[in-house]
Image: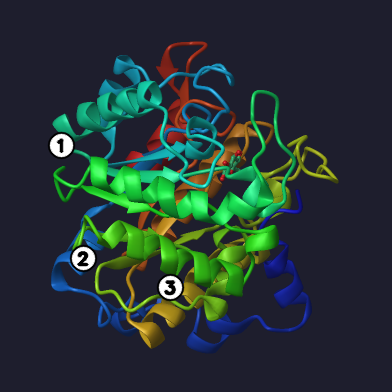
Amino acid sequence: MLKKNLITTLCLAAGLTGVTAQTGSASTLSGQTLQSCTAVTPETCSLAHKLGRGINMGNMLEAPREGDWGLRLDAPSIDRVAGAFKTVRVPVRWSNHASASADATLDEVFATRMDQVIDALLAKGVYVILDMHHNSQLFGDRLLPNEFGVDPAVMETRVVNMWRQIALRYKDRSPKLLFELLNEPHGRMDGEPWNVLAARTLAAVRTSNPARTVLIGPSYWNNVRDLPKLRLPPDRNLIVSIHNYDPFEFTHQGVTYLPKPFPTGTTCCNAKQQQTMTYSLDAAVKWSQANGYPLHLGEFGANQSADMASRETYTRFMRDEAERRSIGWTYWDFAASYGVYSPKTGNWVEPIRRALLD
Ligand code: BGC
């Protein structure tokens, strides 16, 4: 998987040091550089700003089956995250828990499990971002063990029909429940195919949830690079989700699922690395100002193969820079290989916890 933010390197190489260079350094950011809300309702604008500090429950429900990747979204995890964060993003591999046919009838046992998770989180008072994650075949990615394939002719209709059912199921839940239509569309979904599918899917959601806030992100793994290609359906309750893993060779060092893994040993964050991190945030804010949608930073994080001092520096810097632009965020991830919590020790990974929360 050629992931995400090689773009920053490309832009810098092409001399497009862009937004940061043109508008002054990050330290001169002013009120005018904050995101805009002119395309959305006051409620959705306010919600975007209330999401604040959050966490991704990674490697749990987006594994082919919960538990396949060693983690479960259990009650102690819910207590821990709800006591520390305002928002919890729940990645879910819905495509593996619905019939293979076009109607994609949800597996009732799994859906009941999801009811428990969502209700337990909402009962704690946190905002919940319910996300459709890893719809592998839709992107042209390989299927994993325990993941089933479907007739390619029904892949997209299944997304629409899964969301029709999910939305109906949760239509009466609190407005603190937000839907995110698709994590990191890429591959076959880059550009226009995603615009078309997002519009169809949102229309299905709107039949039962006329005003719930929905997150939609650009293609190319929610990379800011593709914001100019994002064509949003006319709808005043949208937040635009972006992901930022710059500097990619630092955050993804030692990660073996990349086609060409990066060596370990890269530290963070010198001035050039800081510039790659703020470049995307500034470009996103510029896009927001031009288009009127508030933003959410749905993922950032540094893999545990990086040295801890650098991970702490990276995490604090990205948190601060997002917050200086009033962008709410959800760190990737809670307890897996980027984790802020160690299931092994049963404790927070203190340097990451303090970089996020202190
Ligand atoms: C993926 C994870 C991955 C993370 C960082 C997430 O969107 O779901 O599998 O570890 O990004 O690359």
Residue drawn at x 60%, y 58% is 221
Query: For ligand 1, which image quadrant applies?
Result: top right
Amino acid type, label 2: Thr
**Could you tell me which residue is drawn at 43 percent across and 12 percent down?**
346
Relative to 280, say whether 55 is above or below.
above
Q: Is residue 182 visible?
A: no
Q: Which residue is mark 1?
A: 125
Q: Secondary structure at mark 2?
A: helix
Separation of marks 3 and 1 at Cα, in angstroms: 34 Å
Residue denoted by label 2: 44
Judging by the rendered image, the residue that carries numbered circle 3 is 27
Foreground disc of the pair 3, 2: 2
Residue 345 is situated, as x and y percent measured from the top left of the image, at: 48, 11
Label 1 near ligand 1 (CB < 8 Å): no
Q: Position of residue 318 (x, y in %)?
A: 48, 55
Residue at the limit of the structure toward the top, as seen here: 345
